[in-house]
Image (cartoon, grey):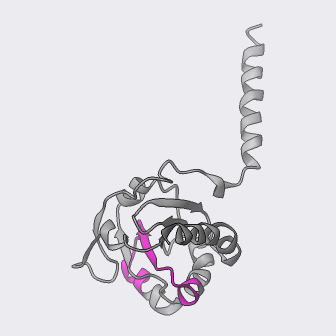
Amino acid sequence: MKSLIPALLFFIISGFLFVGLYKDPSLVSSPLVGKSMPSFSASTLFDAHKTVTEADIIGEIALLNVWATWCPACKQEHPDLVALAINTDIPIYGLNYKETDKTEARSWLRDEGNPYVFSIADDDGRIAIDFGVYGAPETFLIDAKGVIRYKRVGVMNDKIWQRDFLPIIQRLRREAL
């Protein structure tokens, strides 16, 4: 009987791992959805002397995008974010997450296009921890009052924008009338 316990535990754990392989990581829920975004105070990527807080984002529906140059998926989604910034009236703010080389990050945005109103320098990742970030990229939809309405884990593209973000934005705008 004692020899069956390890085998049984092995099969139970294997079952959980097997099921986990088929789950969509973008569906990871956030306990912050429906709550005010966390308070923060940090410098921006382009100006270490300029301090921004959550109050600088509040006032209109906005996106907060967690990104870094070391993140391959962030580079994949970047052209879509640039197009989104050009083609919509939704401001996008960046959260530059644990960047190892700020000079490289600034150069990359200059070369590839900068979709961000400003990008928060989160050198040690503490702001990201407060937002419940699992990794980059992640994108938060924040309403005009500073409440997080949606969180996307993974790459943002036009299809995801149309399917997941736009309906919420349209609902928020109708409710504001």
Q: Quadrant of the N terminus?
A: top right
Q: Write the residue at 43% across / 80% down.
A: 105
Q: Position of residue 50 (x, y in %)?
A: 24, 78
Q: Position of residue 98 (x, y in %)?
A: 41, 65
Of all residues shown, which one is farthest toward the left? 49
Q: Position of residue 83 (x, y in %)?
A: 59, 87
Q: Considering only vertical position in the picture, is 29 above or below 51?
A: above
Front position in the image: 24 or 56: 56
Q: Considering only vertical position in the picture, is 90 above or below 14?
A: below
The part of the image, by quadrant, that contains residue 46 is bottom left
Of all residues shown, which one is farthest toward the top? 1
Q: Write the residue at 42% across / 74% down.
A: 60
Q: Write the residue at 44% across / 53% down.
A: 35
Q: Position of residue 120 (x, y in %)?
A: 36, 72
Q: Write the residue at 57% across / 80% down.
A: 81
Front position in the image: 96 or 149: 149
Start and end of the magenta stretch? 84-106
Magenta-span inclusion, residue 88: yes
Of all residues shown, which one is farthest toward the bottom? 111
Q: Considering only vertical position in the picture, is 10 above or below 92?
A: above
Front position in the image: 28 or 89: 89
Count of marks, rendered view = 0
Left or right, 26 with respect to 65, comes to right
